[in-house]
C-alpha cells in the first residue's frame, strides 16, 4: 500500500476516491489548469526578437502535479478552447484565433505541449517528482521533444534555418531555466508535505 501512495502525483492528495465528486474535482482542476495556461501564455518576457512566455513552466508544473492522464486531458481541453476561438494562446486575438491560428507558426509547439505534459506526467506517476534530478531529466526530455515538434512544424513553414534562428535558439536559455525551476519546485512541495 505504501508503494501505491508514493507513486501518485500531488493532485492525488486532494482527489476524492471515486464517483461524481472525483469527476467534478478533476473537471475543476482541468479548467483551473487551462486558466493557468492562458495566464502563463499572456505573461511575456521580452528577450530580443521574440517574446518568451511562462507557458512551458506552467505545462511542466501542471503535468508534475496532475500526472499523465489529467495533465494530457487539461492540455487537450486548452487546445479545444483555442480551437473554438477563445483567446487563450500567446498571440490571440492579435494574430488570429481558432484553428487558423493553431495551424500557424506556433502549431508544432502547441501540439508539443501535449507530448510535454505526457512525458512529465508519466514521470510524476512513477514518483520521479520527488527527486529533482530524475524530474529534471524527464522535464528536459519533454522540453527537447516539444521544441523538436515546434521546430519541425515551423521548418515546413519558413525553412529549417529560420526555424532554428527564430523558433529554437532564442528560447534555449529561458526554457532551461524554466525546466530547472519546475524540477526544483515540485520536489520541494513534496518535502514540505512530508514535514507537515
Image: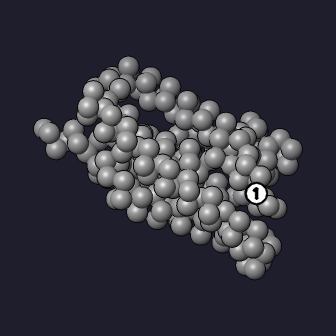
Q: Residue at x 79, y 43 (%)?
A: 92
Locate residue 65 relative to residue 193 in the image: left or right: right
Name which quarter of the figure residue 1 lies in. top left
Locate residue 150, reporting x and y percent.
Answer: 65, 64
Can you see residue 125?
A: no
Locate residue 78, reporting x and y percent.
Answer: 61, 41
Name which quarter of the figure residue 194 lies in. top left
| Residue for badge 1 | 47
Residue at the left extreme, as displayed = 1
115 over 18 or under it: above or below? below
Which residue occupies the foreground of this view, 126 or 78?
A: 126
Can you see residue 171?
A: yes
Give the colouring mode of the picture: one colour
Which residue occupies the foreground of this view, 98 or 145?
A: 145
Locate residue 64 relative to residue 58 in the image: left or right: left
Q: Quadrant of the C terminus?
A: top left
Q: How many marks?
A: 1
Residue at the bottom extreme, as displayed = 161
Locate residue 148 relative to residue 163 in the image: left or right: left
Q: Residue at x 38, y 34 (%)?
A: 11
Q: Determine the secondary structure under disc 1.
A: strand
Q: Residue at x 50, y 50 (%)?
A: 181
Locate residue 98, reporting x and y percent.
Answer: 76, 45
Residue at the right extreme, as displayed = 94
Locate residue 52, reporting x and y percent.
Answer: 71, 53
Name which quarter of the figure residue 25 lies in. top left
Could you classify mark 1 by the number of other residues whose Cα lies within 10 Å: few (under 14), some (14-19), or many (20 or more)?
Answer: few
103 over 148 or under it: above or below? above
Q: Residue at x 85, y 49 (%)?
A: 95
Amino acid at each position: 500500500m505504501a508503494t501505491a501512495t508514493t507513486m501518485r502525483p500531488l493532485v492525488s492528495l486532494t482527489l476524492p476516491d471515486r464517483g461524481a465528486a472525483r469527476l467534478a474535482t478533476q473537471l475543476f482542476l482541468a479548467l483551473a489548469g487551462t486558466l493557468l495556461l492562458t495566464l502563463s501564455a499572456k505573461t511575456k518576457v521580452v528577450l530580443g526578437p521574440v517574446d518568451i512566455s511562462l507557458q512551458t513552466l506552467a505545462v511542466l508544473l501542471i503535468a508534475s502535479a496532475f500526472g499523465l492522464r489529467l495533465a494530457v486531458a487539461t492540455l487537450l481541453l486548452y487546445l479545444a478552447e483555442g480551437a473554438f476561438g477563445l483567446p487563450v494562446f500567446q498571440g490571440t486575438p492579435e494574430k488570429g484565433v481558432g484553428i487558423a491560428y493553431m495551424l500557424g507558426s506556433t502549431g508544432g509547439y502547441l501540439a508539443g505541449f501535449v507530448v510535454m505534459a505526457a512525458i512529465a506526467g508519466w514521470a510524476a506517476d512513477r514518483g520521479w517528482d520527488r527527486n529533482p534530478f530524475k524530474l529534471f531529466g524527464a522535464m528536459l526530455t519533454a522540453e527537447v521533444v516539444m521544441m523538436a515538434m515546434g521546430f519541425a512544424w515551423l521548418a515546413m513553414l519558413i525553412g529549417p534555418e529560420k526555424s532554428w534562428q527564430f523558433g529554437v535558439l532564442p528560447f534555449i536559455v529561458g526554457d532551461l531555466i524554466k525546466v530547472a525551476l519546475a524540477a526544483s519546485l515540485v520536489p520541494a512541495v513534496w518535502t514540505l508535505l512530508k514535514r507537515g
